[in-house]
Image (cartoon, grey):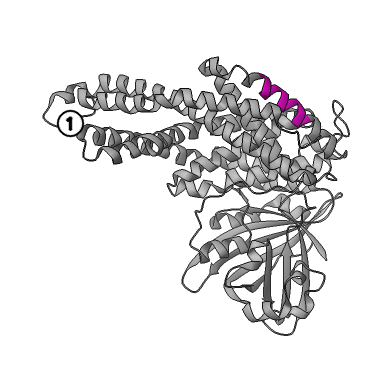
């Protein structure tokens, strides 16, 4: 088994030649760059059984050689760029399954797998590669210009692969950072296999939800931080394509990823405190704020105005209100799209990745009593205990909290829920108690979230009325049903009023969930 520690940077095709001509890069290069053509076929079953297990199987033809490769991200690896791989030269251009012993493929029945395996897509690449050497490291830099083909569809790409052959990950981060200062590079989170499967299923702009994070009782604190952080980074960064394609669910899931990363920063604050972390927090808050209007208006439409309009039928005023809010949502979505399409987002994602990979925090042997090499179990136990006590105490007064205090409580509940999810496998033996605890938190978060939405909708309603008064009042007197007409304003008041009867019920449910949380068995004890 080999270990592949590789970082990808996506670049415009026009920038590839500039990279190859960088003087400082040539000074560190050893040998000449040798372009070569590679043709790679990826295999899987009709139901993508390998893909579902996080495994890829390919046969790559380079010159006269055929190389069979199995790749997988194993639970002990700290991030998706650190993968295990098994390579072997084979005689033909189809997989030879007798060579999969000792790989993750051995869990499959070979006869059954052999019958069901089929080519899924092909990747053709022109690769220019050479080693970049320094006193502390050896890194292979490869520029891949190629395309993925499924037979029915094609997609071109250009990327830089930086594979660490010798040295520390900080050297990989240093080289990536310098390259990104020369050309507009984005973090490449998709492998060539990812590109092919997305193209095959027409899901290049699909929505990405939170992944299960495998942190066990034996995991180290520093390793756990990196693994959980990468999971959050993947979720929010990969949803950029969905937002650029106009998918509102992409907005919701990107915000979930950002909030999860905020929770990670809070959990490990004593380990990662420093200027780099402060910079990540600043950009997190910026992006959350850019996405907030699209999220709030989408919830107002999908949870309130849409269902109400469907019940009311052809109510002209309500339909006019719905169209007005949809127009505002479209503008908010454009704001979100611009945010994730600009240089600031691109640089934020890459900076966060390099910080997780080899930030200043990774050089600390000990900070405020937290040792990165210590096991996570005791740390997780203390964190869950402290956060649960804090939430349970505040829930006793949930019915009487004002909007601001309730908002803070909602965020605390959300952070507790994410924390419990991150540390699920640390306390694997307490599965039943853990599930009960998770159900309470989920219901608690739903009700506090709904209370927050009701408050947001009241604020939006006031903003609409003020905007109509200033902008649309002159048009409200003509024969058509304009936005500022009394009928439309009445429809807005009616819609918001219909929601408010939920308020007491949500507060009561939250209070009851607080009582259950107090009694719930602490699965980490």
Label 1 packing within 10 angstroms: few (<14), some (14-19), many (20+):
some
- Is 162 included in the stretch rendered in magenta? no
Which residue sits at x=57%, y=39%?
Answer: 256
Where is residue 502? Give x, y as percent.
43, 27
Where is residue 143? Give x, y as percent.
65, 60
Quadrant that contains the C terminus: top right
Quadrant that contains the N terminus: bottom right
Q: Is residue 473 left or right of residue 246?
A: left
- Of 279 and 233, nearer the camera is 233
Which residue sits at x=29%, y=39%?
Answer: 311
Report the predominant secondary structure element of the magenta stretch.
helix
Which residue corresponds to mark 1? 481
- Of 458 and 346, nearer the camera is 458
Where is residue 29? Give x, y as percent.
77, 57
Asked whether residue 354 is in view, the answer is no
Q: Is residue 336 left or right of residue 382?
A: left
Res 363 quadrant in image? top right
- Of 370 and 375, nearer the camera is 375
- Is 386 included in the stretch rendered in magenta? yes
Where is residue 304? Give x, y as percent.
37, 34
Which residue sits at x=68%, y=36%?
Answer: 437
Asked whether residue 337 is in view, the answer is yes
Q: Secondary structure at mark 1?
A: loop
Magenta range is: 383-393
Outermost residue on the bottom side: it is: 91
């Amino acid at each position: 088994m080999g270990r592949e520690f590789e970082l990808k940077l996506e670049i415009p095709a026009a920038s590839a030649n500039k990279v190859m001509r960088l003087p400082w890069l040539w000074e560190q290069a050893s040998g000449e760059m040798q372009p070569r053509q590679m043709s790679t076929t990826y295999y899987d079953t009709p139901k993508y059984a390998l893909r579902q297990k996080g495994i890829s199987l390919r046969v790559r033809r380079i010159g006269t050689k055929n190389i069979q490769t199995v790749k997988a991200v194993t639970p002990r690896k700290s991030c998706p760029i650190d993968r295990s791989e098994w390579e072997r030269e084979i005689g033909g251009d189809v997989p030879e399954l007798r060579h999969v012993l000792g790989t993750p493929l051995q869990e499959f029945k070979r006869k059954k797998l052999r019958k069901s395996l089929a080519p899924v897509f092909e990747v053709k690449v022109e690769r220019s590669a050479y080693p970049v050497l320094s006193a502390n490291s050896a890194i292979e830099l490869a520029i891949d210009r190629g395309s993925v083909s499924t037979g029915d569809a094609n997609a071109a790409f250009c990327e830089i692969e930086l594979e660490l052959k010798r040295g520390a990950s900080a050297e990989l981060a240093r080289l990536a950072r310098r390259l990104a200062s020369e050309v507009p590079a984005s973090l490449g989170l998709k492998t060539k296999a990812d590109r092919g499967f997305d193209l095959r299923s027409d899901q290049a702009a699909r929505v990405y939800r939170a992944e299960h994070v495998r942190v066990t009782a034996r995991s180290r604190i520093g390793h756990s931080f990196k693994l959980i952080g990468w999971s959050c980074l993947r979720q929010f960064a990969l949803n950029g394509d969905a937002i650029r394609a106009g998918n509102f669910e992409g907005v919701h899931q990107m915000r979930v990823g950002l909030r999860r990363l905020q929770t990670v920063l809070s959990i490990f604050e004593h380990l990662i405190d420093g200027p780099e972390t402060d910079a990540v927090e600043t950009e997190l808050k910026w992006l959350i704020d850019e996405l907030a209007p699209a999220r709030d208006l989408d919830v107002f439409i999908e949870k309130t105005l849409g269902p109400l309009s469907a019940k009311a039928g052809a109510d002209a005023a309500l339909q006019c209100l719905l169209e007005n809010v949809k127009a505002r949502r479209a503008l908010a979505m454009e704001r979100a799209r611009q945010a994730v399409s600009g240089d600031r987002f691109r640089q934020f994602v890459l900076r966060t990745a390099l910080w997780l990979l080899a930030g200043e925090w990774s050089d600390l042997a000990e900070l405020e009593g937290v040792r990165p090499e210590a096991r996570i179990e005791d740390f997780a136990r203390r964190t869950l205990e402290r956060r649960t006590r804090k939430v349970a105490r505040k829930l006793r007064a949930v019915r009487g909290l004002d909007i601001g205090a309730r908002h803070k409580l909602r965020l605390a509940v959300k952070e507790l829920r994410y924390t419990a999810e991150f540390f699920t496998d640390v306390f694997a033996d307490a599965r039943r108690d853990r599930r009960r605890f998770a159900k309470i938190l989920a219901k608690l978060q739903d009700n506090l979230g709904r209370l927050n939405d009701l408050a947001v909708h009241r604020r939006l309603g006031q903003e609409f009325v003020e905007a109509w008064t200033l902008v649309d009042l002159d048009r409200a007197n003509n024969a058509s049903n304009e936005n500022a007409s009394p009928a439309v304003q009445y429809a807005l008041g009616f819609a918001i009023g219909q929601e408010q009867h939920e308020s007491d019920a949500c507060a009561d449910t939250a209070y009851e969930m607080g009582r259950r949380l107090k009694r719930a068995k602490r699965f980490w004890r």
